[in-house]
Image: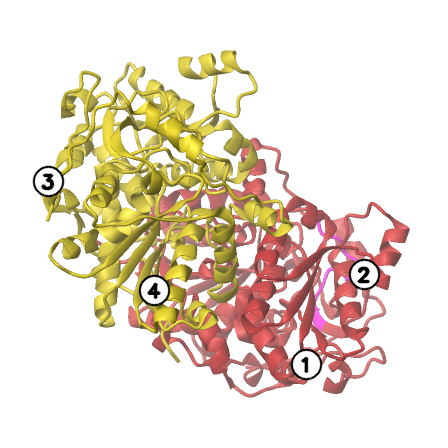
Chain colours: A yellow, B red
Amino acid sequence: MEIRKILLTEDEMPRQWYNVLSDIKMNPPLGPDGKPVSPEALAPVFPMNLIEQEVSSERWIDIPEEVLSVYNIWRPTPLVRALSLEKALGTPAKIYFKNEGVSPPGSHKPNTAVAQAYYNKEFGIKRITTETGAGQWGSALAFACSQFGIECKVFMVRISFDQKPYRKSMMAAWGSNCVASPSTETKAGRDALERDPDTPGSLGIAISEAIEATVTDETGQTRYALGSVLNHVLMHQTIIGLEAKKQMEKIGEYPDVIIGCAGGGSNFSGLSLPFVSDKLNGKQIEIYPVEPSACPTITRAPFVYDHGDTAGYTPLLPMHSLGHSFVPAPIHAGGLRYHGMAPIVSQLVSEGIMESKTVTQLEAYKAGVLFARTEGMIPAPETDHAIASVINEANKAKEEGKEKVILFNWSGHGLLDLAAYDKYFSGEMKDYILSDEEMLKSEEVFANYPKPALLKSR
Amino acid sequence: MEIRKILLTEDEMPRQWYNVLSDIKMNPPLGPDGKPVSPEALAPVFPMNLIEQEVSSERWIDIPEEVLSVYNIWRPTPLVRALSLEKALGTPAKIYFKNEGVSPPGSHKPNTAVAQAYYNKEFGIKRITTETGAGQWGSALAFACSQFGIECKVFMVRISFDQKPYRKSMMAAWGSNCVASPSTETKAGRDALERDPDTPGSLGIAISEAIEATVTDETGQTRYALGSVLNHVLMHQTIIGLEAKKQMEKIGEYPDVIIGCAGGGSNFSGLSLPFVSDKLNGKQIEIYPVEPSACPTITRAPFVYDHGDTAGYTPLLPMHSLGHSFVPAPIHAGGLRYHGMAPIVSQLVSEGIMESKTVTQLEAYKAGVLFARTEGMIPAPETDHAIASVINEANKAKEEGKEKVILFNWSGHGLLDLAAYDKYFSGEMKDYILSDEEMLKSEEVFANYPKPALLKSR
């Protein structure tokens, strides 16, 4: 009988995160004056120890014991050979995935939530605010804060708050306070409600509320947390790829292709960045971030300087962006509905080290159902996008008769997204592909924005 | 840093189930004529290879390779030291739990669902019918049938079908057909709808529908599957306890107390039966099945002969029972709302080898929330009952200053039961304790039923 799961013991878990900034060059974020932002300027929003990580170029950063001890609740996660999926596809490719769905909130998000909660606690912070769209990030931060005895306040986009009540219940189980955004608790929220009392809300408004709730706390003991995009967030996620590398070494394998779905870029980067380092040193690997056709940020949008949020509160970040006022189509993969892409991923794509792929919503769900009926576990809608791309690669390997090794990130389970599967089965689910018109609109946005320099890391 | 999880590799997974019938004496099930039921009489309902397992007294039964291969999707499951819970309680007791929530449907149920699907397939069966209450069993069988390419039809009690739509979605994701019961597809269903078109349904009616759908299939290629109570079901679950034993051996531990919640008795037996064998040979262990105060079958009901279903279709089974027409209070732990108890558990309790405990619903949820905020994972409402009892034992150990080793079964996660946690937090959740009046009514039921003989296995 062939082995499905390659395990590591807690003793074998990596003790350091990998910082890709030691290996690549990046454009700096810019302030409203067009000049690079100083770390101090971010101090009212993030604790200084995380700001230091954001700008650090040290290659390895020690994972604190307290963080490792919480990681041990679910890490190391299994590396799984998708034997039944391979068989169903009749492919000569070997497909491996890293199962990040085994964490308490069910996704990769706690890898950084736990680290961020810990560093905030260390810095003397008593309360963290954040926003959440589909709810994966909010529930991960709620879990992490419960582990360190920190108060947690989540502003959840109204439409998701109403459609996904279980996410709010999860946060309550971990003792966090989750309110629908726009709320009456902030000026940004009240203004939004005055403009439209029936607004479904948006991630942009929710970010504004969370930041406002932080900077207006006069005790100075509140900070804001972000679940993707930023350098330190991606670095905390590298535990995924570092474990995967160790696990593949154990069985004498090395990936030819690495795949992950990419919204803000954190789960994809967590798996792929430790391999980027090898690629910069000459290893042959294909690395594919996978986007929804409805929101193909890397694939179709330019590499520019843009804000991370809709309201324009954040510095200008060097990234692929559809424009900070872009509103993606209502696909059922909330985690992939983001107008931008992590600067690190954007930079690596601009250098040709990674190459994006897109799949449509219906392709994604079809792949997710095949996965559930072969490998057993029901994937999150976001993860379905990675699986669809894996299947395309496995089919290509079949055509070419090549025994490729494909590694992908199973970023989370879909047990709180089952209503979307119902919609897929009912035939009511639609495909959305970004039109050329919409793209042109997006290009206009950037006419007057500064442009990032083209850099070369190898 | 102390280790939380004790793992086994797939190679270390036990290759045989343990059959407790090799170690204890049992009263036989009786037919309508008051005589022991012959295996042949069950042939229209179950495949003969499972009936043979039901009556076997062989000590070890080989787990087929095909079953092991599917078990490998999530087994061996981790044995976890509940370090954070211990710390929160300030107990000298060491608390270990077996995490059965890592299976694709999220509970221990697939341990037998996979085995039953396999044996049905081997026997040439093309379609399995079953009933489900809260949905754990129906979704486990749907998953198992998808692995072996068998059709699966689930009759789900109407009120749960409406309240827990995600369970139905899970079954659909695995390709099963789930309908609300009573349905118009069977005579039993149509009769029930005629009596009351707005009936919420009951497990009794759903069992009748599932059995009718099996015995009326003229092709002879349909059989019925049960998720608990029967001997072969409990035997398939012993993989839990056999793994736990190996894992404890690895760290030089042996349990003083074993705890599991008990509805029909299958998850509790899965963990405890391999240790019963040691207890019969003189080992000192306390073994506690935990029941809800609303449905205290072992704790307060007599050891009698009674039907397993409300309609009285099944043979008379020797078990603790509140009467097959007993309707338990509407507690949010559907899996513990059963009028009877597995004959094996009933027999072992009657011999004093196990001793039942009860906890109320509010005690259970309070315990579940403490668990979520310490150990991270959110437990199923059924599992909350086991946790409440574990906390009682850990507190007792604290009072006595004893370093006891407590082992319990974490039978499943609560991610599809979060609405019940909302109710707990809102303060709307009620406690139910079975009244003496109700108990007396239940005693009357048995006036004319045969009585099981009192047997002694040691």
Q: Which residue is mark 4?
A: A96
Q: Which residues are magenta?
A: B318-328
Nearer to us: label 2 or label 1: 2
Amino acid at the residue labelled 4? Tyr
Q: Tell me which chain the residue with mark 4 is part of.
A: A
Q: Which residue is mark 1?
A: B47
Residue shown at 76% from the left, 80% from the top: B220
Between the C-alphas of marks 2 and 1, the distance is 23 Å
Depth check: A38 or A258 in front?
A258
Tell me where residue A71 appears, x and y as whole percent: 29, 50
Instruction: Check contact, mark 1 vs mark 3: CB within 8 A.
Output: no
The C terminus of chain B is located in which quarter?
bottom right
Between the C-alphas of marks 2 and 4, the distance is 43 Å
Amino acid at the residue labelled 2? Glu
Between the C-alphas of marks 1 and 3, the distance is 65 Å
Q: Is residue A327 above or below residue B357?
A: above
Image mark for residue B185: 2
Which secondary structure lies at badge 4? strand
Looking at the image, residue B379 sits to the left or right of residue A271; the answer is right
- Characterize the local packing of mark 4: few (<14), some (14-19) or many (20 or more) Cα atoms within 10 angstroms: many
Q: Which residue is mark 3?
A: A57
Tell me where residue B195 appears, x and y as whole percent: 90, 51
Q: Quadrant of residue A138?
A: top left
